[in-house]
Amino acid sequence: MEHTPRNPDRYKTKSCPTCSKSHKKRGKFCSRSCGNSRTFTHKERLSRSEKLTAHLNSPEALDQRNAVAEQGKLSMAKIRNPDDADLQAMTLDDVYVPPLTLNLNVDQFVMDGDIWTDAD
């Protein structure tokens, strides 16, 4: 199977809508950078900002950030202790425990990590 060289006259001469250069390439843009350049309206930027802020404040995003942080801590521990075979075999599932949520009664409170009950 022979390789045929590109035919430079394959595409007609066009003007790039971003930089106004004339080119004979496939598509309407002269390069990838011109094709990727786009200006967003204030309304589009505001909409994207609101959606991203809502996502970052969601419990799922917090859990994901915590999982990534725990994975980083485990990876650094493995790097610092290369001779520890048990540590090298550990995965994130062995280390990461999701945060505990407490449902306390009205007369209970937490102090120094302990649950206390008010005495009469």
Image: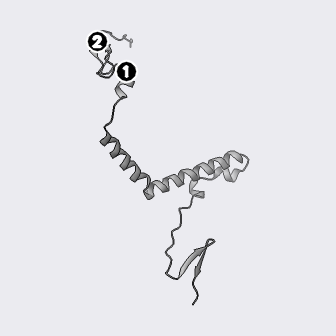
Report the residue marked by disc 2: 10
Report the residue marked by disc 1: 31
User: Relative to the observer, which residue lies in front, 120 or 36?
Assistant: 120
Numbered circles on residues, count: 2
Question: Vertical placement of 32 versus 45: above or below?
Answer: above
Q: Residues within 10 Å of mark 1 (few under 14, many from 20)?
A: some
In this rendering, position of residue 94 left or right of residue 102: right
Residue at (55, 77) in percent of width and height: 109
Give percent across and percent down for residue 72.
59, 48
The answer to whether mark 1 and mark 2 are in CB contact below 8 A is no
Q: Residue furthest right?
A: 83
Screen quadrant of the N terminus:
top left
Q: Amino acid at mark 1?
A: Ser
Q: Nearer the viewer, mark 1 or mark 2?
A: 1
In this rendering, position of residue 5 left or right of residue 82: left
Give percent across and percent down for residue 116.
59, 79
Screen quadrant of the C terminus:
bottom right
Q: Amino acid at mark 2?
A: Arg
User: Relative to the observer, which residue lies in front, 111 or 28?
Assistant: 111
Label 1 – label 2 distance at C-alpha: 17 Å
Q: Residues within 10 Å of mark 2 (few under 14, many from 20)?
A: few
Q: Earlier in the sequence, mark 1 or mark 2?
A: 2
At mark 1, the secondary structure is loop
Residue at (32, 16) in percent of width and height: 25
In this rendering, position of residue 90 left or right of residue 98: right
Give percent across and percent down for residue 58.
42, 56
Q: Residue furthest front?
A: 42
Question: Vertical placement of 117 versus 31: above or below?
Answer: below
